[in-house]
């Protein structure tokens, strides 16, 4: 761990010094303006956060430290015999702003393996929940139970110098990432596989071992997990899960508390839970139409029905993106390569041909294209994972890579507690008729 921390500190010190200079010289420069509709409508488009690990372009999609998903698929180290990137690599890249070599990769895998022990009380806490509890609730409860292990919380209670915060957040972040696959697999096996658990395999990579503990030994599923864990890892700083983790962390809540908070946001149907909603919606369509492979006209009618019932079409639309999500494309390519004849995947592709023009015709949807959640479930079902309520837990395990790397950077750069200003409509009314001023105006 020593060498990791030294490596990180050299980079963080240089970045902190640069940011200090930027603020000193340019701190009063304005970035855009804030409109009334933005403060009423989800702060869309307001630049108000720094997140170093990835950047989202509305038309191009996500870049992790400057690299697109296809570039990462080419440049990141792979498992032996595999062709998908190892997610440890994207974590390394987000953390150190440097592409890992094969050797760096192996070192990261080994470090995570050494930190992966989950204490028994975590499993006992999950066991105390009724079996019909949603897997995301079980998962977050497991994370909360694991908070007893927070190095940051212990050191803070003892009295910690603020320049050392990052080091203990670093330890907690690594521990948490190492342990999450075990907790997630425990939730899955408890809820869906007769409470029969599978011990970790220390010879496997982080995602391969996760697949193994879930009970999936197929090499194709392991490859899928590597891709899945890589592409869901981060989506810049403003999405609900990343922003919540960052916000809660800014109060110096430890990484376990911050991550659990973020994952409660991921569990919302407009965010990460959309992956379960997509498959549920397709299964219901297949059942209603009495066919595994509905035609485009049938899909079109079903979509119109969904909209007429005042529901969203899950897996479509995005607050920032204005084109097909490259994470959707990466999964579609995986499907075309490994399961071109799969009826569910073909349905997902037929939906892709059908839905955007319908959404576009409504005239109010800013992005009619599919997002990451539109595809993931079909690939999982192909390998036998049909329990769609579990899907958001997979997303959560992956998202830990981005939000934990960001949290380490937040503390290393000394970001303060986050506290934007809010207003009341009464104040807005007064401001509009000239009798009140709005702070910052
Ligand atoms: N189906 C139907 N209506 C949709 C829609 C969809 N897929 N996407 C947006 N709309 C509607 C909105 O509900 C809104 O309607 P009202 O004006 O009547 O309230 C209108 O179109 C404008 O919305 P927008 O500005 O285009 O989208 P937002 O930035 O407000 O919301 C998102 C973005 C993702 C929440 C929205 O597109 C949505 O609900 N999609 C379906 C759920 C989904 O797939 N979420 C996963 C996103 C990815 C992730 O975080 O994992």
Image (cartoon, rainbow, N blue to C red):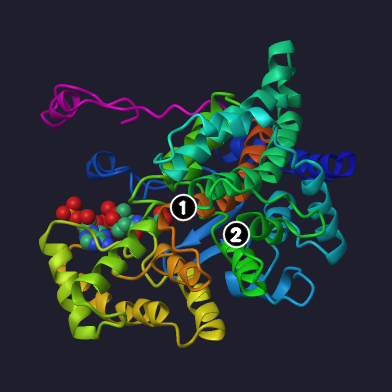
Residue position marked by numbered label 2 in the rendering: 229
Q: Nearer the viewer, residue 217 or 58?
A: 217
Q: Which residue is at a point 79% across and 61% down the rendered structure image?
A: 100
For residue 56, side relative to residue 3 (left or right): left
Disc 1 Cβ-to-ligand 1 distance below 8 Å: no
Write the residue at 44% across / 58% down: 387
State which region is magenta.
416-441
The disc, 2 or 1, on the residue closer to the chain's N-terminal end is 2
Magenta stretch, main secondary structure class = loop
Question: Height in image: 19 above or below 203?
Answer: above
Question: Does the segment drawn in magenta span residue 45?
Answer: no
Question: On the rendered image, what quadrant is the C terminus found in?
Answer: top left
Residue matched to label 1? 390
Measure the alpha-carbon separation of dots 2 and 1.
15 Å
In the rendered image, is residue 22 in sight? yes
Q: Quadrant of residue 305?
A: bottom left
| x and y percentages locating residue 110 in the rendered image | 83, 51
Instruction: Please rate how many residues cluster around mark 2, counting C-alpha atoms within 10 Å: few if below 14, some from 14 to 19, many from 20.
Output: many
Looking at the figure, which quarter contains the N terminus?
top right
Q: Quadrant of ligand 1?
A: bottom left
Element on which disc 1 rests: helix
């Amino acid at each position: 761990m020593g060498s990791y921390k030294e490596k990180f500190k050299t980079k963080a010190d240089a970045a902190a010094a640069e940011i200090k200079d930027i603020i000193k010289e340019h701190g009063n420069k304005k970035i855009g303006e804030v409109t009334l509709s933005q403060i009423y409508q989800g702060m869309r488009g307001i630049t108000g956060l720094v997140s170093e690990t990835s950047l989202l372009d509305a038309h191009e999609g996500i870049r992790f430290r400057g690299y697109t998903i296809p570039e990462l698929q080419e440049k990141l180290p792979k498992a032996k015999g595999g062709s998908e990137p190892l997610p440890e690599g994207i974590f390394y890249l987000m953390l150190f702003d440097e592409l890992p070599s094969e050797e760096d990769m192996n070192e990261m895998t080994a470090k995570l393996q050494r930190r992966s022990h989950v204490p028994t009380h975590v499993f006992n806490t999950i066991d105390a929940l009724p079996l019909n509890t949603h897997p995301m609730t079980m998962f977050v409860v497991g994370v909360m139970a694991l908070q007893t292990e927070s190095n940051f919380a212990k050191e803070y209670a003892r009295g910690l110098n603020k320049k050392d915060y990052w080091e203990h957040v670093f330890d907690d972040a690594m521990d948490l990432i190492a342990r999450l696959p075990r907790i997630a697999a425990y939730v899955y096996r408890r809820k869906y596989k007769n409470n029969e658990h599978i011990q970790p395999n220390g010879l496997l990579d982080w995602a391969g071992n996760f697949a193994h503990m879930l009970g999936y030994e197929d090499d194709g599923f392991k490859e899928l997990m590597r891709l899945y864990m890589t592409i869901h890892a981060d989506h810049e700083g403003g999405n609900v899960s990343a922003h919540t983790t960052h916000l809660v962390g800014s109060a110096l809540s430890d990484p376990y508390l911050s991550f659990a908070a973020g994952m409660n946001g991921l569990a919302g149907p407009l965010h990460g839970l959309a992956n379960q909603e997509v498959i549920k919606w397709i299964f219901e369509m297949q059942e209603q139409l009495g066919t595994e492979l509905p035609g485009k006209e049938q899909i079109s009618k079903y979509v119109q029905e969904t909209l007429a019932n005042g529901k969203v079409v899950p897996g479509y639309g995005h607050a920032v993106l204005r084109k097909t999500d490259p994470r959707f494309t990466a999964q579609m390519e995986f499907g075309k390569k490994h399961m071109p004849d799969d009826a569910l995947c073909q349905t997902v592709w037929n939906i892709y041909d059908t839905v955007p023009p319908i959404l576009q015709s409504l005239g109010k949807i800013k992005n009619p294209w599919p997002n990451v959640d539109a595809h993931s479930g079909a690939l999982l079902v192909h390998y036998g994972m049909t329990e769609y309520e579990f899907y958001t837990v997979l997303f959560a395990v992956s998202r830990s890579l981005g939000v934990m790397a960001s949290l380490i950077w937040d503390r290393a750069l000394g970001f303060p507690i986050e506290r934007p200003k809010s207003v009341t409509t009464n104040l807005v009314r007064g401001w509009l008729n000239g009798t009140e001023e709005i702070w910052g105006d």
